[in-house]
Image (spheres, rainbow, N blue to C red):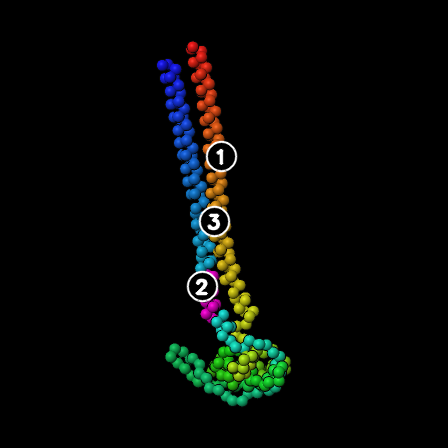
Amino acid sequence: MFLWAGSKAAQGSGSERSRTIYQKIREYDILEKRRTVTALKAGEDRAILLGLSMILCSAMMYFVLGITMVRSYSDSVWTEESNCTVLNSSVVAEINCSYSCGSECRKSSRYPCLQVYVSLDSGKVQRLSYNEEAHEANPECFYIPKCRKEQTLMHTIVMNISERLKMHQQVLCYYDPSEQQDGVLLTRLYGRGAIISSLLWPTCTLVGGTLIIAMVKLTQYLSFLCEQISRIKRMGLYSLRGASHAQVCTRKFNGGIQDVV
């Protein structure tokens, strides 16, 4: 009877000791997890918010560039380059225009219409325009200056352009290979280089925001793995300690029984 009661008391004390150790381990894990989450959550939230803001800004820039520059570039029919020889550059007429003199005030003025004819590499003669806007506004004139009150200033600007064209006989121009549009352009409003340079910044912003979010998620995943590994190690260590302590208590108890017997 005494032996049975002693062994039962030893088993009860061993189980209570194991429960106490397990509760301490669990409480320690919970406290450590709370401290880690509290310390890292604020910085991670800010980093993710920064990454999302960068992605949103890049999407807005892509949208704006898509409906302005990229659309104008894709709709343009002047896509082929050619070396053009200036044949004639002269003022042929005076064109009426209007300028603003204040709120609800418009006055009229006149600017000289400069006509420029060039010869392409193929030998075809075409009328030259400065860009798409000038061609749409008035295809007869090479360049349309901003309408001003001073007609002499506009005339001086146009004549300076005419002299420069006469000095440079060979210029690079753009023409329509399908010949749907008459005339050629000296420069495109949005060229390939301008499109690439404009899309570079939103692309960098998109890549940067994506990398920030990916790095935060990777850090969270690695932190979770480290926490799991450290918890497994602690559980194994405490289990070994508990088992060794129970073996020592059992040996002492058995030795005491043998002494009593």
Per the model, the C-alpha gap separating discs 2 and 3 is: 24 Å
Towards the viewer: 60 or 39: 60
Is 8 left, or right, of 198 in this rendering? left
Give amino acid for label 2. Met
Per the model, the C-alpha gap separating discs 1 and 3 is: 24 Å
CA neighbours of label 2 inside 10 A, class few (<14), some (14 to 19), many (20+): few
The reply to whether residue 240 is in sight is yes
Towards the viewer: 196 or 240: 240
Label located before the other in sequence (2 or 3):
2
Tag of residue 60 = 2
- What segment carries the magenta color? 57-69
Residue that carries the numbered disc 3 in the rendered image: 217
Label located before the other in sequence (1 or 3):
3
Q: Which of the 4 quarters of the picture holds residue 14?
A: top left
**Does residue 67 show up magenta in the picture?**
yes
- Coordinates of residue 193 in the picture (x, y in percent): 56, 69
Q: Residue at x 42, y 10 (%)?
A: 260
**Does residue 65 show up magenta in the picture?**
yes
- Coordinates of residue 205 in the picture (x, y in percent): 50, 59
Q: Residue at x 54, y 80 (%)?
A: 178
- Coordinates of residue 155 in the picture (x, y in percent): 53, 84
- Coordinates of residue 24 in the picture (x, y in percent): 41, 31
Q: Which of the 4 quarters of the picture holds residue 161?
A: bottom right
Q: Residue at x 50, y 54 (%)?
A: 211
Q: Which of the 4 quarters of the picture holds residue 253?
A: top left
Residue that carries the numbered disc 1 in the rendered image: 233
- The residue at the far bottom in this view is 92
Give amino acid for label 3. Lys
Tag of residue 260 = none
